[in-house]
Every structure is written in C-alpha cells, then in structure tokens.
Image: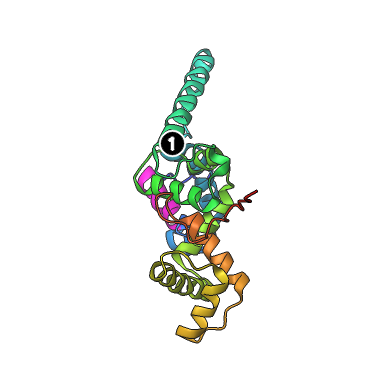
Amino acid sequence: MGKKKRTFDIGFKKKVVDLYLEGRLGCKAVGKEFGINHTTVLRWVRHYEAEGLKGLEEKRGKSKEPNKEKSVSHLESSETKIKRLEAENEMLKSSYRCKRGMGAVSTYKKFKVINEMVKAGKKFAICLLCEIAEVSRSGYYKWLKRQISPSEKQREDEELKQKIKRCHQKFRGIYGYRRIQIWLKAVYDLHVNHKRIQRLMRDEDSSSDQEEASLLRKKRSLCYVR
C-alpha cells in the first residue's frame, strides 16, 4: 500500500512562505522549523510569487473537465489582464510616479513602492509588481533583506547622510559636496572622501520623495553679455 501524501491548508502554507520571505532564515531552516522538506518551501514560494494566495491552493485530487478547459483558460487570461491593469493603476497612484515614465524612477523608489503595496495588503503577486516596475524579483528581495538587517557600512552611511542633511538645512542648500566635506571635518572631525559624500547625496535624492528639496545643487547656466 502506497504512502499517503500529506496535505496542508492554505493558512499553514502562508505562514511558511511569510517566514521565508522575511529573509532571516533559508529554505532549509524554514523547512526544519515547520517539519517539511526545503524543496516544498521553495515550491510554495514560487507558486505564491506567481499567483498570490491562489497559487497556495491545494490542486491534488481535483478532477479536470476537458470540455471546460478552454473557457477556464480564457477566463484566467482575462483575470490576469485585469489584475495587471489594477496593479499598474495602483503604482501610478503612488507619490513616486514620474511624468517621464517608469524608466526615469530610481530603483530604490520602485522597491519602496512595491514594498508599500505589499504591506498595504494589495493582493498582487510580487513577480507582477516587479515586472511592471521593470526590476528583478531577486533584486527586490536583496533590497528587502538590507532594510531588515543593514550592514555596518550601511549604518555608517546612514549616520553620515543625517550629518549631510544637517549641513544642507543649516546653510539652506548652498553648499556643494566639497564644502560639505570641509564642514564635516571642521564640525565632526570626519575625514570623508568627497566622492563618497557626492554618492550619498545622490542616493538620498533618489530615495526621497519628489516634493523634498534636492541635496545636490543644480548647475548654473552661464550667461554671456555682449
């Protein structure tokens, strides 16, 4: 007599997927935590990313009706298109939209929008949101992991950004990165390469909302008087 396969309800599968997507544990550790094989964990994650909660529904034991296959396929295709349009509309509603198109929005902002939509309980598959935002799914999960557990260098960069902001506010944005370098040395006795300061200012500009003032000074156009 063959061994009976175990079945799991959708709530259990969702807990497994959520724990894995947090990024703290690998697939083997998550599998050990719930007493299942790590390949099962990866399969559920793939199904969830592709179809959302629908992908976690139990499909074994359900009879197939060949006569209805075409109509069901057409219905699913229509639902997929509608879902995509809804996801695109939600992204356009966000405060990070750009008139020049998605390609002009920084990658950081795209990841932030996707994460906010997921946190808000929007029932869109992450792979769909990444496709619309023109970013990779693996890149999004790496970004998410960095937000949860930043490295020592990221923490140092964040502290340095706050000091740069204070200088920017104190002098009303008239200091460029070279004068900020001198200010950091005079006030905090920090010896920071000017290229690093310029990079952090550029990163802060790309991660902040469009309504916020830019840390980078705009280049002045030269005016010649005849």
Pick the front one: 201 or 63? 201
Residue 108 x, y percent position in the rendering: 51, 53
The three-letter amino acid code for the residue at tag 1 is Leu
Question: 183 or 48, which lies in front?
Answer: 183
Residue 226 visible? The answer is yes
In the displayed structure, 185 sits above or below 99; it is: below
Rendered residue at 56%/43% (across/down): 104
Residue 17 sits inside the magenta stretch:
yes
Asked if the stretch drawn in magenta spans residue 199, the answer is: no
Provide the residue designation for mark 1. Answer: 92
Q: What element carries label 1?
A: helix
Which segment is the magenta one? 10-19
Residue at the farthest front position: 226
Decide which of 180, 157 is in the foreground and name it.
180
In this view, the residue in front, 155 or 64, is 155
Q: Could you tell me what secondary structure mostly forms the magenta stretch? A: helix
Q: Where is residue 217 in the image (x, y as percent from the top left)?
A: 52, 59
Q: Residues within 10 Å of mark 1 (few under 14, many from 20)?
A: some
Looking at the image, how many numbered discs can be counted on the residues?
1
Q: Which residue is drawn at 49% across and 57% down?
A: 205
Where is 20 relative to 99, above or below? below
> Residue 157 placed where, x, y %?
51, 72
The residue most toward the bottom is: 189
Q: Which residue is drawn at 55% across and 76% down?
A: 181
Colour pattern of the rendering:
rainbow
From the viewer's perspective, is 15 left or right of 78?
left
Residue 28 makes an appearance in the image: no
